[in-house]
Amino acid sequence: MQSPTIYPFVAIVRQDEMKLALILNIINPLISGVLIRGDKGTGKSTAVRALAAILPEIDVVENCPFQLPPGSNHAICQVCGPCPDPVRVIRRKVRVIELPVGATEDRVVGSMDLETAIKEGERRFEPGILAAAHRGILYVDEVNLLDDHVVDLLLDAAAMGTNTVEREGISISHPSRFTLVGTMNPEEGELRPQLLDRFGLYVRITGIPDPMARVEVMERRAAFEQDAAAFVQRWEPESHALQAQIQSAIQRHPLVRIERTHTVGIARRCIEAGVDGHRADIITYKAATALAAWRGRNQVADEDVETAISLALPHRLRRLPFDEIDRLP
């Protein structure tokens, strides 16, 4: 059974677009994450934290601070010593690593282990958040409040897929490929365009206008607070069904094909929207194939392309104010 401290992902009421964007990033992590923009109290953080319970499992070298898979290049084992022979492998869920808004550079990229240096006279690297996030999801709540320097570090790691740290005569590079998921409240400021474009998909959520749906939100939250274990058990069948559907989509995704007419259509829509560069085209392509897999098809359909466009283009229409980008031309 799921941990009673985790609110079930399937129990989140009427935020289908947000849940879909997160699921697409599970199916294809190369979509490059999602930015969830909405008012306070709309379930943004709850949805991301609840995501952990339905993530797929991966093989990881036991006790590896860099989350390396078996059979990978272990040259960076100079940091934690030689790997055992044979290498011990464990199977665990993909992790959601949270980046605190006030995180320092050393906490993010890693730092020198001063205690070891003082006691043993050896210089040893202490991995940071970017090491823990490798092959996982890096979640930044209130991403628009991040320090600019930390934002630059995230951009570098996201672009290169590696994190390089040079400290006191030691130079360490380790893989750091992660799915970036951010939430933000527009009342607290906007994002730098450089960071905004790094998010593959974008969703904007608001409070639910339907009174009965709002009542359902209240009732579910009250039930969770009254007896979390019973509430999680109530949603366990739906959670397992969602996990199975995601696993099926992951397996189907490499088989999905997209016709040239659809790729040409994506390119034309991006040109018409006036987006900069080619990232929008690529992300829309990836999202459309993931959508087809999610919907149980081996061929991308028109509706997959339209949905992908609605998720991949809005935040890249930089010529319009944010309040006007939720409807595409």
Image (tube, rainbow, N blue to C red):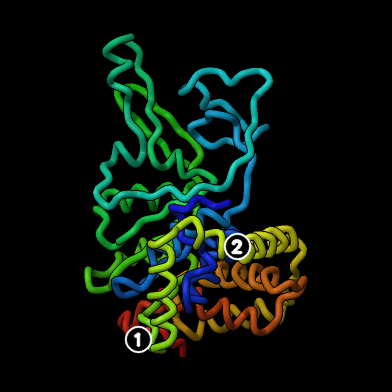
Label total for image = 2
Number of residues whose C-alpha sits closer than 10 Å to that of mark 2, classed few (under 14), some (14–19) or many (20 or more): many
Q: Residue sitting at 39 percent across and 67 percent down?
A: 44
Residue 118, picture quadrant? top left
Q: Is residue 293 above or below residue 247?
A: below
Residue 84, picture quadrant? top right
User: Is 262 left, or right, of 74 in this rendering?
Assistant: right
Q: Is residue 161 above or below residue 35?
A: above
Q: Is residue 166 above or below residue 252?
A: above
Q: Is residue 15 above or below residue 60?
A: below
Residue position marked by numbered label 1 in the rendering: 324
Pick the residue in front: 272 or 302. Answer: 302
Disc 1 residue type?
A: Glu
User: Is 136 left, or right, of 323 in this rendering?
Assistant: right
x%, y% of residue 282? 57, 67
- How much space separates mark 1 and mark 2, taking CA atoms? 35 Å
Circles 1, 2 touching at the beta carbon (< 8 Å) = no
Can residue 278 be seen by looking at this rendering?
no
x%, y% of residue 53? 54, 54
Disc 2 residue type?
A: Ser
Q: Which mark is residue 239?
A: 2
For the residue labelled by badge 2, is the local secondary structure a helix, a strand or a loop? helix
Residue reaching furthest to the top: 120
